[in-house]
Amino acid sequence: MSVNLAHTQQTRVSESLRSKVPLVSTMAATSSAGEIAISSEEKVYNVVLKQAALVNRRLTPPATKDLHRMKPDGAAVPGNLSLLKEAYDRCGEICAEYAKTFYLATLLMTPERRRAIWAIYVWCRRTDELVDGPNAPHITPTALDRWEARLEGLFRGSPFDMLDAALSDTVKKFPVDIQPFKDMIEGMRMDLRKSRYKNFDELYLYCYYVAGTVGLMSVPVMGIAPESLATTESVYNAALALGIANQLTNILRDVGEDAQRGRIYLPQDELAQAGLSDEDIFCGKVTDKWRNFMKEQIKRARMLFDEAEQGVKELNASSRWPVWASLLLYRQILDEIEANDFNNFTKRAYVSKAKKLIALPVAYARSLAGPT
Amino acid sequence: MVSLSRVLSVSYPAKPSVPCKTFSSSSRLVQKPRLNSKWRSMATEPDSSSFAPSVDSDSSADKVTAGFCIIEGPETVQDFANMELQEIQDNIRSRRNKIFLQMEEVRRLRIQQRIKSAELGILKEEQENELPNFPSFIPFLPPLTSANLKVYYATCYSLIAGIILFGGLIAPTLELKLGLGGTSYADFISSMHLPMQLSEVDPIVASFSGGAVGVISALMVVEINNVKQQEHKRCKYCLGTGYLACARCSNTGSIVLIEPVSTVHGGDQPLSTPKTERCSNCSGSGKVMCPTCLCTGMAMASEHDPRIDPFD
């Protein structure tokens, strides 16, 4: 699949790259007088371009490079395959435990893709728990550096433990790049330092680090439909938009919970514009100012979901249904926040089981529409 | 006090303190003056995440502990590899001592915290040292406290009394027939076209069987709920074992060394058995630390949990 992808996409991407690159540099030059200040959106866009280019440059499936690679001082011992199967099963159990809706969506995928997504999910969750979980007080920058070293090891074919081994096997089978993973660790480093975001630009970068990267990680697994005429980077952009929309939805749902831990993931300048301050959020009272502010935030998140919808059509036929399902389900959370009268301080917006079940056939219907 | 500020900067989860049985080495209790010197020396270490370098043990250990990091990598079990056996034992002893003393510090700090909160009028949300709520093992029932335990007893006894009254007095008086459509057991048997002998079951036997079925299914429900709750407390990544299989040696503990054998010249000689060496990732145990639960096997590692040993 990846080979077909490479051959058909390569010529198109190089043309669009040539047309897009000058655009980016002019955007950079005119953004502010004197210094070349690159906005987060442009930085992230550059990453997307690089990812798309890497996928297209991979003419040989990466599997042949590493599959029979000898480790410098030893070799794989028999028993590897059963350990790998057990590792993937464990990843599935962990996913089922911590993200039930997401797990249900993965059941709609093909078995190989399902296992790959589980492995990616578990790595991302373990990384997130380093700074967010019960052991967070003990995590230092050194700990994150070591975690990054383990990541590099598993990409080289030397995973440390069995869950790393599952991800190592996944990146052998699918053309996944290491950069989004490194960026996610960078996002964790950011989370250690920051608890306030001055403007949307900073928040966008954070959302890219923790959620946009997940979109970029999963596109190579989902696969772009061979008959798609869209550019690779437009699909990556749509995946990025979906990730960021998901993260913004999370943020808007968990305002109260985050405030209790002293964190506010809303842009400070927009809060000021709406006449709100940190104290109002810690206070937890729903006022008209808050309602207006939330309406604007929800509008922006919905715009990103709309942008993401454009790209789902271009994915492989067997991957469209689960992606549509997760998109529609997550989007519904925004509706629930509205239904709660924008009270995200004390009420947790959640989608009822009935609504979740109805979303499945709706998603199926939308997934029938293929690439335009 | 500098040590206080260091201690306060670490936020441990506020759980009720479980009496620690591991510190039977309380015979090593230190007298007051030495206690103060220990606290002052602890204040010198850099930040909250590294373990305090031991004061009365060897200075060579200090270099190692200064770079301590809670995430394992391929070479980390070798952190203390350069020590001699006696050094290691001394290190273990002094660290155990320190943990014991620090737990006592935490206890005293908590007392002060409680006093100060009360002075400032800050209401503490959870009364940790009161008898905690026991979530009921039976699903759908509200959690038990010592207060509503009395209500539970009363409800239970009255239900039993009511059912005995119903079965013994009310039902025979009203000639109550609880079969489908108001049939008795005899009617039910004849409608199923089974031999009428079956309808002549003795009432005592019938009530015994019914009661036994009820009790057994109730116990099953309670057990299943119990298992679910215990599983809930288990770390999901390592399934309560505290360890994940080492990927380098695939859980065996040893790596097979490969020696390329040339088949051109020495083709007739039989292959020698491959040499193995101990896996450096896991030091031969075949498993590595689960970074989520830190080898405790619990869903959330706290300072009270004993760490699971790989060689057990």
Image: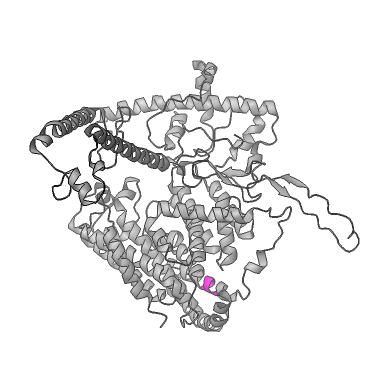
Residue A281 is situated, as x and y percent measured from the top left of the image, at 27, 51
Quarter of the figure that contains the N terminus of chain A: bottom right
Residue A367 is situated, as x and y percent measured from the top left of the image, at 38, 74
Report the number of numbered marks: 0
Foreground pick, A327 / B240: B240
Q: Is residue B57 visible?
A: no
Foreground pick, A235 / A105: A105
Residue B308 is situated, as x and y percent measured from the top left of the image, at 54, 35
Above or below, comparing residue B257 to residue A55 in the picture: above
Foreground pick, B295 / B213: B213
Range of the magenta residues? A49-53
Where on the picture, by quarter, is residue A164? bottom right
Q: Would residue A120 be found to the left or right of residue B118 on screen?
A: right
Name which residue lies at 70% across and 30% down.
Answer: B84
Name which residue lies at 60% across and 28% down.
Answer: B92
For the stretch drawn in magenta, the main secondary structure is: helix
